Image: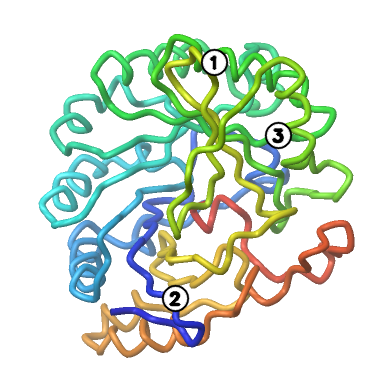
Amino acid sequence: MLKDTFGRIHNYLRISLTDNCNLRCFYCMPEEEYNFTPHGQLMQVDEIELLAKLFVDQGISKIRLTGGEPLVRKDAPAIIERLSQLPVELHMTSNGIRIDDMLPQLVAANFKSINISLDTLRSERFFQITRRDYFDRVRANIDLLLQHGICTKINMVVMKGVNDDEILDFVALTKNNPIEIRFIEFMPFSGNKWTSNQVYTQADILHQIHKVYPTDPIPAGPHDTARAFAIADHVGRIALISTMTAPFCAGCNRIRLTADGKLKNCLFSQGETDLLTTLRAGGEVLPLIQENIRSKSKELGGQLMTNFEQIDTDFLKNRSMITIGG
């Protein structure tokens, strides 16, 4: 069991497979030329399996694959097949571009859910945000997931003046589709030029939705990061992730393993523990994991303020989003 000093038990591991991506979203990665981690410095298939088994032995019951874009790795099928043999729920967050290429492997692995990152339903705006022209393929692949009965969620990072005018368009998707739309407050990371006036808050989102749709709150579990709501006569539902205005740290059960084998006990932690180097040297990894969890801060990595308007990103010590893995 992995327990921190605040009594939180951690049973959810997010594993980043790569910091590479076939999109260039401005809020995820620095705008300047980016040097992706060489393949040899990434965790290899056997190493991912070994570490995953170690975490499962310590009580991890849910694993989510992230990136970058996890499906750009050529050996992603092998990784997915290995992890699907473990006694865990398997989930993934993807940009959706390679879902069609990988559909047989995804179906065989019996993913509990797949989250697709999609911040706009307009092709021209998709290109502006991602700097790539894949909108039609992503939309088709969301439909493909639904056709195969795979639980599908859409992650929309809401940014004031960028895509906040599309919130109701996303809600409309839940009318006839068994899909969850997750509205996410814009968060600060290294190189993404975050400012507090770009944050479209949970209250703002709900206010806009309630002008058109009445909502009914869905009871949340102790570790849920999203507040979910049902809408009458809608097959799907909506949810809000309010990291900036209403953090949910008290129930946190998540830890993150970066693609280069570093353990982060919080999305915003400035510290991390190198597991891969020790693993490759034949050393004991479990004590490092346990110490990392014990050092976890009470909330927001110990470096963000709960009043997001006072956050000074010049003093923020963290990776870029793409190197953390979300």
Q: Secondary structure at mark 1?
A: helix
User: Are dots 2 and 1 in contact, CB under 8 Å?
Assistant: no
Task: Point out the tag, 2 or 1, that comes first from the N-terminus.
Answer: 2
Give the residue at mark 3: 158
Q: Residue at x 72, y 32 (%)?
A: 206
Q: Residue at x 26, y 78 (%)?
A: 280
Give the residue at mark 1: 135
Q: Residue 63 occupies which quadrant of the picture?
A: bottom left
Q: Secondary structure at mark 2?
A: loop
Residue situated in front as seen by the camera: 271 or 36:
271
Q: Residue 293 occupies which quadrant of the picture?
A: bottom left
Q: Describe residue 36's horizontal placement relative to residue 247 as left or right.
A: left
Residue type marked 3: Val
Q: Residue at x 18, y 29 (%)?
A: 107
Task: Point out the tag, 2 or 3, that comes first from the N-terminus.
Answer: 2
Q: Secondary structure at mark 3?
A: strand
Q: Residue furthest left?
A: 85
Disc 3 to disc 1, C-alpha distance:
18 Å
